[in-house]
Image (spheres, grey):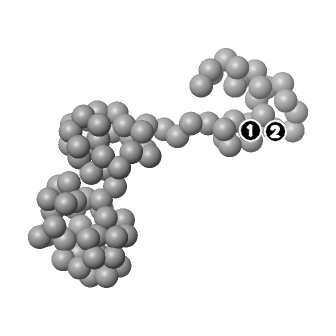
């Protein structure tokens, strides 16, 4: 995104409409892979460099869990046996 263009838009469009448009149109910030440190798009499920699962899910209920969780906070499924599926 061109910073100069967005700065001019925010300054010259009245009533903070340019500011609102910027926040609606901006691209999401990149995330860093916890395993290899590569920069990845937040929409990616796996790191393109090391195949680390960036958004692990419970194998039972398929809801999102954190990388270090031992049990699913939603269905109480033990995640220790499924660490290979979670990308840990």
- Element carrying mark 2: helix
**Percent position of residue 18, x then y:** 78, 34
Q: Is residue 60 visible?
A: yes
Q: Residue beneath label 2, please?
A: 17
Q: Residues within 10 Å of mark 2 (few under 14, many from 20)?
A: few
**Quarter assignment of residue 75:** bottom left
Give the residue drawn at x 68%, y 43%: 24
**Which residue is rendered at x = 36% and y = 65% of the image?**
64
**Residue 51: x and y, percent?**
23, 43
Q: Secondary structure at mark 1?
A: helix
Q: Tell me which corner region of the image, top left, top right, bottom left or bottom right, holds residue 44.
A: top left
Residue 71, relative to residue 32: is it above or below? below
Q: Residue at x 74, y 38 (%)?
A: 21
Q: Which mark is residue 46?
A: none
Q: Quadrant of the C terminus?
A: bottom left
Instruction: Tell me residue 9's x, y (percent).
Output: 77, 25
Q: Is residue 61 above or below residue 46?
A: below
84 left or right of 73? Answer: left
Of the 4 image quadrants, the one containing the N terminus is top right
- Tell me if 33 is positioned left or right of 8 in this view: left
Which residue in the rendered view is the most extreme toward the top? 4
| Label 1 sits on residue | 21
Distance, label 2 to label 1, CA atoms, is 6 Å
Question: Observer-nearest residue: 45 or 36?
Answer: 45
Label 1 CA crowd tier, 10 Å (few <14, some 14–19, many 20+): few
Q: Image check: 85 left or right of 72?
A: left
Callout 2–callout 1 Cβ contact below 8 Å: yes
Task: Say if 50 sits above or below 73 in the image.
Answer: above
Q: Residue 76 sits in which quadrant?
A: bottom left
Q: Is residue 65 visible?
A: no
Query: Which residue is located at x 38 percent, y 40 percent?
Result: 31
63 or 32: which is nearer to us? 63
């Amino acid at each position: 995104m061109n910073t100069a263009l967005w700065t001019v838009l925010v300054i010259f469009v009245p009533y903070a409409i340019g500011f609102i448009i910027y926040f609606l149109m901006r691209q999401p910030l990149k995330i860093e892979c916890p395993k290899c440190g590569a920069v990845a798009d937040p929409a990616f499920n796996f790191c393109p460099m090391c195949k680390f699962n960036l958004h692990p899910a419970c194998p039972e209920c398929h809801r999102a869990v954190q990388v270090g969780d031992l049990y699913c906070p939603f269905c109480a499924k033990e995640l220790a046996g499924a660490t290979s599926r979670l990308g840990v």
